Amino acid sequence: MQVRTCLNGILLQEKDHKTDTSADLSHATNTKPSEQELEDLLFASKICKHTKSNTIVLAKNKQLCASGTGRTSRVDALNQAIHKANSFNFELKGAVMASDAFFPFPDCVEIADKAGITSVIQPGGSIKDQLSIDYCNENGISMVMTGTRHFKH
């Protein structure tokens, strides 16, 4: 167990021992990730797992481009990551995005698309998953789902 103190109490959370592999992935979209994107997706997922939630990780060529961490929403985390990548002049065209939680709305995949992201890994599990999947299908973005939520407080 991991223990964190908080105002007037403590938070107990089990340590996350799961590392996503290609065998865990289900392809949610018509477009499938390339071999390079698949490597980058699994790399980004590992970083995501060890980062404070809500988190978005952007990676390319097995290099961390940027991450947005500890935000109240995935949109805020994504905007933070894009801003950070741009401030270091990282080219996001062809990069991938990992999220520690599902996308109940297509807003994040749309923002990522406009930034140049071409592939997404996320746990899935929202009753509105199809909205994000539809956006990706309409715009040629590949999306895979892990079925595991790596949420770290």
Image (cartoon, rainbow, N blue to C red):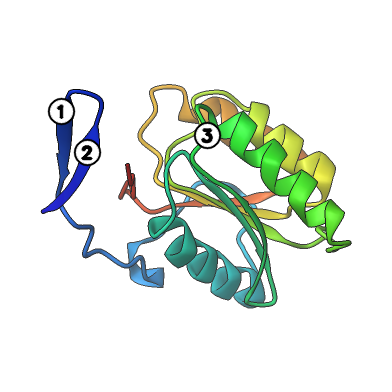
Tell me if I can see residue 137 in this picture.
no
Q: Which mark is residue 71?
A: 3
Q: Nearer the viewer, residue 53 or 59?
A: 53
- For disc 1, the neighbor class at 10 Å (few under 14, some 14 to 19, many from 20) is few
Q: Which mark is residue 62?
A: none
Quarter of the image where the C terminus is located: top left
Three-letter amino acid code of the residue under disc 2: Thr
Read off the residue under disc 2.
Answer: 5
- How far apart marks 3 and 1 lie (CA) works out to 21 Å
Above or below, comparing residue 32 to residue 80 in the picture: below
Q: Nearer the viewer, residue 11 or 86?
A: 11
Residue at 62% of width from left, 30% of height from top?
Answer: 75
- Disc number lying in front (2 or 3): 2
Asked if the residue at tag 3 contacts the one at tag 2, i.e. Cβ–Cβ closer than 8 Å, the answer is no
Residue at 65% of width from left, 40% of height from top?
Answer: 78
Nearest to N terminus: mark 3 or mark 1: 1
Three-letter amino acid code of the residue under disc 1: Gly
Q: Quadrant of residue 11?
A: top left
Residue at 33% of width from left, 63% of height from top?
Answer: 24
Nearest to N terminus: mark 2 or mark 3: 2
Asked if the residue at tag 1 contacts the one at tag 2, i.e. Cβ–Cβ closer than 8 Å, the answer is yes
Q: Nearer the viewer, residue 136 or 60?
A: 60
- Disc number lying in front (3 or 1): 1
| Residue projecting furthest to the right | 89
| Left or right: where 138 falls relative to 104 | right
Which element carries disc 3, helix, strand or loop? loop
- For disc 3, the neighbor class at 10 Å (few under 14, some 14 to 19, many from 20) is some
- How far apart marks 2 and 1 lie (CA) works out to 6 Å
Read off the residue under disc 1.
Answer: 9
Which element carries disc 1, helix, strand or loop? strand
